[in-house]
């Protein structure tokens, strides 16, 4: 993890160890928020940037050079409270990512195994391949979205395919929200009564 410190819109580039922001980060047990941390103390590990901005009329600094914020109890507690709020959001994000990873793996396994079962069954019975879409919907029981990104003259083109592998029709709105840049085309896509085992794509 990289800690980026600011005070009154000014970056603090030196003396991170003496700063109240760095100490507050080190004193929180980030393991309860899903991050790796040795013995529940110190700066956690992982591909993450933590941006901390302390704003106020009279910020106490450790020296006249204003390179670090003094660890005043009231300020440290407020920083910790803000970090814990951010930690809960991080935990929620990590849980959703892990859930999506498990669903993706389940979908991949089922969609790989069922065609082979269908083929073997067809060879035994001497009939044609058995349609597996309905079975896949019952077994997988997920709404699955795949995304493909490709560069073009205007930036990037994103194609999303929505699969309804549940046992009933589904209706929802797919919202495109790019983290950077301007979106060309529609931002919301209405999906009405997508039948089981059916799919629809958007670009």
Image: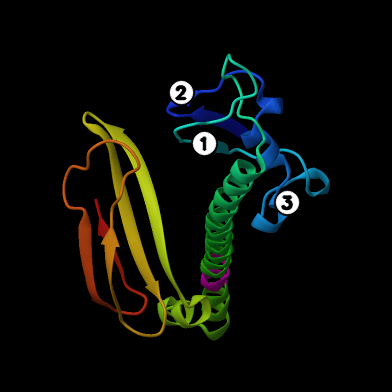
Inter-mark Cα distance, 1 to 2:
12 Å
Work out whether mark 3 precedes mark 1 in sequence or the reverse, and give the earlier one: 3
Q: Quadrant of the N terminus?
A: top right
Q: Which residue is mark 1?
A: 51
Give the answer, above or below, for where 3 lies relative to 195.
above
Residue at (46% x, 23% y) in the render: 10
Give the answer, above or below, for where 89 lies relative to 17.
below
Q: Is residue 63 magenta?
A: no
Q: Are marks 3 and 2 in contact (CB under 8 Å)?
A: no
Looking at the rendered image, the disc whose residue lies closer to the viewer, 3 or 2, is 2
Q: Residue furthest right?
A: 39
Disc number for residue 201 = none
Q: Picture coordinates of residue 119 (x, y %)? A: 53, 73
Give the answer, above or below, for where 10 lies relative to 170.
above
Q: Which residues are magenta?
A: 112-116
Is residue 88 something that shows in the picture?
yes
Q: Which residue is mark 3?
A: 29
């Amino acid at each position: 993890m990289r800690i980026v410190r600011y005070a009154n819109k000014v970056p603090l580039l030196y003396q991170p160890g003496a700063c109240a922001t760095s100490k507050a980060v080190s004193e929180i047990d980030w393991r309860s928020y899903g991050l790796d941390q040795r013995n529940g103390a110190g700066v956690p590990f992982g591909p993450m940037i933590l941006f901390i901005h302390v704003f106020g009329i009279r910020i106490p600094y450790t020296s006249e050079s204003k390179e670090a914020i003094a660890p005043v109890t009231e300020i440290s507690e407020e920083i910790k409270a803000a970090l814990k709020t951010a930690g809960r959001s991080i935990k929620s994000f990590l849980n959703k990512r892990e859930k999506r990873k498990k669903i993706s793996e389940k979908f991949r396994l089922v969609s790989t195994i069922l065609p082979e079962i269908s083929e073997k069954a067809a060879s035994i019975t001497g009939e044609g391949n058995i349609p597996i879409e309905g079975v896949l919907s019952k077994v997988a029981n997920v709404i699955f979205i795949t995304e493909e990104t490709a560069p073009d003259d205007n930036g990037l083109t994103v194609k999303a395919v929505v699969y309804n592998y549940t046992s009933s029709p589904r209706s929802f709105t797919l919202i495109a929200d790019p983290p950077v840049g301007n979106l060309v085309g529609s931002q919301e896509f209405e999906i009405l009564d997508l039948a089981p085992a059916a799919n629809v794509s958007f670009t």
